Each structure stands twice: as C-alpha cells, then as structure tokens.
Amino acid sequence: EKGGYEHFMLKEIFEQPKSIQDTMRGRLLVDEGIIKMAGIWDHLEKFSNAGRIIIIACGTSWHAGLIGEYLIEEFARIPVEVEYASEFRYRNPIITEKDVVIAISQSGETADTMAALKLAKEKGAFIYGICNVVDSSIARITDAGSYTHAGPEIGVASTKAFTAQLTILSLIAIKLGKHNGTLSNVKFVELITELDAIPKKIEEVLESTHDKVKEISKDFINAQNFLYLGRGYNYPSALEGALKLKEISYIHAEGYPAAEMKHGPIALIDENMPIVIIAPKRGHYDKIVSNVQEIKARKGKIIAVVNKGDVQVSAIADYVIEIPDTSECFSPIVAAIPLQLLSYYIAVYRGANVDQPRNLAKSVTVE
Ligand code: M6R
C-alpha cells in the first residue's frame, strides 16, 4: 500500500507529478487554449461581479489560500481576503450577497472551515469549495466547487493535496483573468503553457534534489529552531515549509516574509540558527539577495532554494538546493518539493513517526 516507500508521506511526495497532472486533466486544454472548469463557468457572473473573494481555510490549506490571493489578485484583479476559518466564524464578519467565499480543505471535514462556510451561506454569500475528498461535508454544502484530484492523502502532513490546491487556484485565477479581460491573450497562453509543464518539472525536481536534501537533513537533526523566509509568492511557501517541519519533526520553526526580518526576528540569528531561504530568480530576487547578506553577516546557517544556475545567493549560502525555473506564480509548487523532503528526512533521522505525528489528526473534525 505504501508502494515500496517507507512512509505514506514519502510516497505522496513522489506522487506529485501525477497528482498535479490528474488535477489538470480535462481542465487545462493547452492545444485548444482553454481552461474548462464547470464550477467556475456555470457561475461566472457571481465571480465577475464579486466585490471581493474571501478564502477561508486552516493549516496548509490556509497557506494555499494565501498563494491563491496573490494569483487571483494578479490575474483576475478581484480583491481577495484570506482568513483562518476559526477566526472568521467568531468575529461577526461583514459578508454580503456580493461576496464569494471559497473554502479550501483537503478532507472537506474540518470543523472550523465547515462552520465558517455555513455562516457565510446564511449571510447570503456564494460559497465555493476546493476539496480533495469527494462528497465530503464541505463539498456537499457548497453552491459549487472544483475537486483537487490528488487521490487519497494518508500522511497527516499534507503534501500532494497542497500542490493540487495550488494547481486549482492557478487554473481559477487564470480562467477568471481571461474572462475579466485583465489577462492578455499572450499572457494567458504563456501561463497555461507553463502550467502544463509543471508536472514534468516536479519530476525533475524530485530527481535532482532528493539525495541532496537527504544529505543536508543529517546536519540538522539536532536543530532547536528553524526560520523559513521568502518574499511575494514564496512568503506563503516559507509558512508552509515551517509548518511541515514543526508538525513532523517537532522542531520549532517559523516562516516570515524575508523583509520582516529586521522588524524583530533578526535578533534570533546566530551561528546556531538554520534559515531556509526560498529565492527563485523571478520575483524579488535582488531584494532577497540583500536579506541573505544580512543573515550571513550574523552567521546564520543558510539553506537556499534557488534556480538552476543561480550565482548570487548560492555564493553566500551554506547549502544550495537547485530547482527548475518557472513563472513566479507557479514557483511555490516547485519550491514545495524540497521543503517537503527536508522536513521528511529531518523527522525520519530524528526517529519521529512521520505519518502520524503526536497530537495531530488527519481531519480536524472538532474545533
Ligand atoms: O483537511 P483540511 O485541508 O481542511 O485540513 C486543514 C489542516 O488541518 C491541515 O492542512 C493541517 O494543517 C495539516 N496537518 C498540514 O500538514
């Protein structure tokens, strides 16, 4: 059942070229230049007329939501807010019939997400689900939705569900952008062509980084803390990398937008602090180079995730993990892979039960 892998988590990490492909199948039709998504198509007016989109979720799905915000705002130019379901449901939020609320949930059973959706529905919002489990409670209560087709995810740490969620959010943002006229045809074609190439790049990154990340992991078995930094689309990647490490290795980790360093966390940096920097060349590369220099000056141990052929960050970093180049908006999908592997191997070397970490459940059905 684990297909020869030691843990479900590793199997699920390696399934990602396929799970992403499955999520795009029948939807991304590159040759015809279209994105087919019935859930969006049938309710296009709701989305186009939405005053704003509110994304609600918990944990990893919330991180996917943050990237969804960047995607939808960049391409469809609709304002997006992302909220923890647990906060949203108890703060008497302002919701109107013009709002579209998207819930993201792997299990489709998360109690807080479910309650937040019910509230939004009562207040008249149009509610949309992005779930992995077919016919789950959230999938059933929503007005419409798109399933991620990641297949069953058994490991408590979410891996392939996360990249499938990013795939769906990319498709939605690009489709809405095309419909709204906020995305040029040239850019549309460029994006769908690049998205179509992602499964291949995931295969590549699995192959090229696996052994290296496994090696690197050995040096951090006794770490007490970790910082993860990224900017733009990869700020949520940093949050997700940190969460993954926390939940399975029990090492304290925090993710931050790299520029927030100097507003506090930089005080933590010394020669004992490992810092994972996600720094692909597109986006805010120059800015991140200066952040890396600041960290180096304080002797932090830098593990950098960069694009192949990178020079500047690689020259400063203590450990370099190279990933293939892609559009900035899809870089979190590619960057997720080495971060998943890093937390996996650190946890394995620490002897932790990676598939069933202490205190955690796969579906959080109580608040
Ligand atoms: O099933 P959901 O996507 O609604 O679950 C949300 C979180 O409980 C979940 O993502 C959790 O944070 C994972 N264990 C992360 O790996």
Image (cartoon, rainbow, N blue to C red):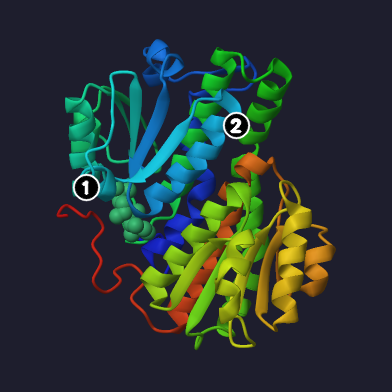
**In the image, what residue occupies the spot 49% across and 59% down?**
239
**Residue 135 visible in the snapshot:** no
64 in relation to 219, above or below: above
Q: Which mark is residue 61?
A: none
Give the secondary structure at mark 2: helix
Q: Residue 237, percent across and down?
A: 54, 55
Judge by depth and name the residue closer to the eye, 50 or 107: 50
Give the secondary structure at mark 1: helix
Picture quarter containing residue 265? bottom right
Q: Earlier in the sequence, mark 1 or mark 2?
A: 2
**Residue 241 visible in the snapshot:** yes
Which amino acid type corresponds to the residue marked 1 in the rendered image? Answer: Asp
C-alpha separation, residue under disc 1 versus residue under disc 2: 28 Å
**In the image, what residue occupies the spot 33% across and 41% down?**
56
Judge by depth and name the residue closer to the eye, 141 or 118: 118
Q: Decide if residue 92 is on the left or right side of residue 50.
A: left
**In the image, what residue occupies the spot 33% across and 76% down?**
353
Label 2, on which residue? 74
- Count of number-bearing discs: 2
**In the image, what residue occupies the spot 48% across and 18% down?**
36
Judge by depth and name the residue closer to the eye, 277 or 17: 277
Label 1, on which residue? 112
Judge by depth and name the residue closer to the eye, 364 or 92: 92
